[in-house]
């Protein structure tokens, strides 16, 4: 039996599950293995084999979700059969990725530690090995490689296979485009799933995801103030202090029911107040609420505004103090930025301008 919580990307959610004794179904366990961001493909296959060995079989999907997946009744009706077919397809695609002489080219990009975007190479290569040779040519950069993405593109076709790998070529994830419909549908089955897992988060918590590209940085650990989760029904809204205005509770329960019936992974959202680089606040949602953790740093600079919004959502301060604090913090940080610009001028110039 696998420990499903150990496959969560969030340590805070994993700790919460262990505290409340939450136990995943076989289908939920399989999904968590797939959604994990750090395990290798081999480790995921080992976990799925363990699910097949130690956990009871169950359906993968029915109704609208099954129709959206486009898989056969046999696969939709058996998690064990689906996992076997899914792993077989992944192994076949990895084999096709490294196969030589099939009229295809390779390109790559690299994500280094501390970078906010991928470093993309503009050349095309005949073999995957040539990409690795180019990436590893500078030995000093090897320790700072977070992830490598290499894409094999068939010339004159839309078919492409992308592997996300470590610097030692260990495969982490696999994706593909332009496959035949049965293979494409099978490869995307997990993307059509949706689950309302328990989390420890409450309205007004400052949370962060180090895996989801949102905010103004890619993988920039951008915190935001949580206001709502897609998994919250009427009871959670009540617990978080939301009044039942305009039949809000009834709408939340209907929405939750619809999500359970036919929502997909992109609907596993968290809503809240995000920030632009200049500190301005905007309301938005992010995907993959399962990746969220508490933001434990003391907000600095314009991020202090998040603390004000957090206190407002927790009903610890009113809208008047929120508005005042927002204005003061923005002005304080603007003045700090403008004071730094004084280094561009001479002391005499600053004196003549009344600044020194």
Image (tube, rainbow, N blue to C red):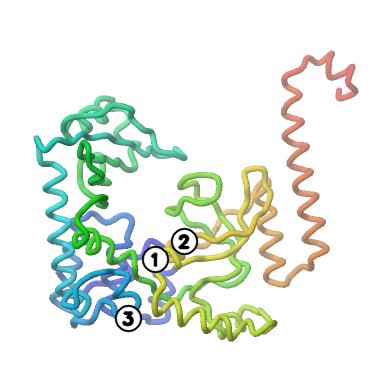
Q: Is disc 2 in contact with disc 1, using a CB cutoff of under 8 Å?
A: yes
Between 13 and 93, the residue placed more toward the observer is 93
- Of marks 2 and 1, which one's residue comes earlier in the chain? 1
- Of marks 3 and 1, which one's residue comes earlier in the chain? 3
Residue found 76% across the figure and 48% down from its top: 329
Residue 33 in picture, x, y percent from top left: 28, 65
Label 3 secondary element: helix
Q: CA distance from mark 2 to mark 1?
A: 8 Å
Q: CA distance from mark 3 to mark 1?
A: 17 Å
Between 201 and 16, the residue placed more toward the observer is 201
Q: What residue is disc 3 on?
A: 63
Residue found 72% across the figure and 66% down from its top: 312
The residue mark sitting in front, 3 or 1, is: 3
Label 1 secondary element: helix
- Mark 3 residue crowding within 10 angstroms, few (<14) / some (14–19) / many (20+): few
Q: What residue is disc 2 on?
A: 287
Residue found 42% across the figure and 81% down from its top: 20
In the orientation shown, which residue stands out farthest toward the front? 156
User: Quadrant location of the C terminus?
Assistant: top right
Q: CA distance from mark 3 to mark 2?
A: 24 Å
Q: Is residue 173 above or below residue 83?
A: above
Looking at the rendering, which quadrant does residue 290 occupy? bottom left
Examine the rendering and report whether any part of residue 172 can be seen. no
- Of marks 3 and 2, which one's residue comes earlier in the chain? 3
Residue 286 in picture, x, y percent from top left: 51, 59
Q: What residue is disc 1 on?
A: 265
Q: Is residue 17 above or below residue 185?
A: below
Between 19 and 215, the residue placed more toward the observer is 215
């Amino acid at each position: 039996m696998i420990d499903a919580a150990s496959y969560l990307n969030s340590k805070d959610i994993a700790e919460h599950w262990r505290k409340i004794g939450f136990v995943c179904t076989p289908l939920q366990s399989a999904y968590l293995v797939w959604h994990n961001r750090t395990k290798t493909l081999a480790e995921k296959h080992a976990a799925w084999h363990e699910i097949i060995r130690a956990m009871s079989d169950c359906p993968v999907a029915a109704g609208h979700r099954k129709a959206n997946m486009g898989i056969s009744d046999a696969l939709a009706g058996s998690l064990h059969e689906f996992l076997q077919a899914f792993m077989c397809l992944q192994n076949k695609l990895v084999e096709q990725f490294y196969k030589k002489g099939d009229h295809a080219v390779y390109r790559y990009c690299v994500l280094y530690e501390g970078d906010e975007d991928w470093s993309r190479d503009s050349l095309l290569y005949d073999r995957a090995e040539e990409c690795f040779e180019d990436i590893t040519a500078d030995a000093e950069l090897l320790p700072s490689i977070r992830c490598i993405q290499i894409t094999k593109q068939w010339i004159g076709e839309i078919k492409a296979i992308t592997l996300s790998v470590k610097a030692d070529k260990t495969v982490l994830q696999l994706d593909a485009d332009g496959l035949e419909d049965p293979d494409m549908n099978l490869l995307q089955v997990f993307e059509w799933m949706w689950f309302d897992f328990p989390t420890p988060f409450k309205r007004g918590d400052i949370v962060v995801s180090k895996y989801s590209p949102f905010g103004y940085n890619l993988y920039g650990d951008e915190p935001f103030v949580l206001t709502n989760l897609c998994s919250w029904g009427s009871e959670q809204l009540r617990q978080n202090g939301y009044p039942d205005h305009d039949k809000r509770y009834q709408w939340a329960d209907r929405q939750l029911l619809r999500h359970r019936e036919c929502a997909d992974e992109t609907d596993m959202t968290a809503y809240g107040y995000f920030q632009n680089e200049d500190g301005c606040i905007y309301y938005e949602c992010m995907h993959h609420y399962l990746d969220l953790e508490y933001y434990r740093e003391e907000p600095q600079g314009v991020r202090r505004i998040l603390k004000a919004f957090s206190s407002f959502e927790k009903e610890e301060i009113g809208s008047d103090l929120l508005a005042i604090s927002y204005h003061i913090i923005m002005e304080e940080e603007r003045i700090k930025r403008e004071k730094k610009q004084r280094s561009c001028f001479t002391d005499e110039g600053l004196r003549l301008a009344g600044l020194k």
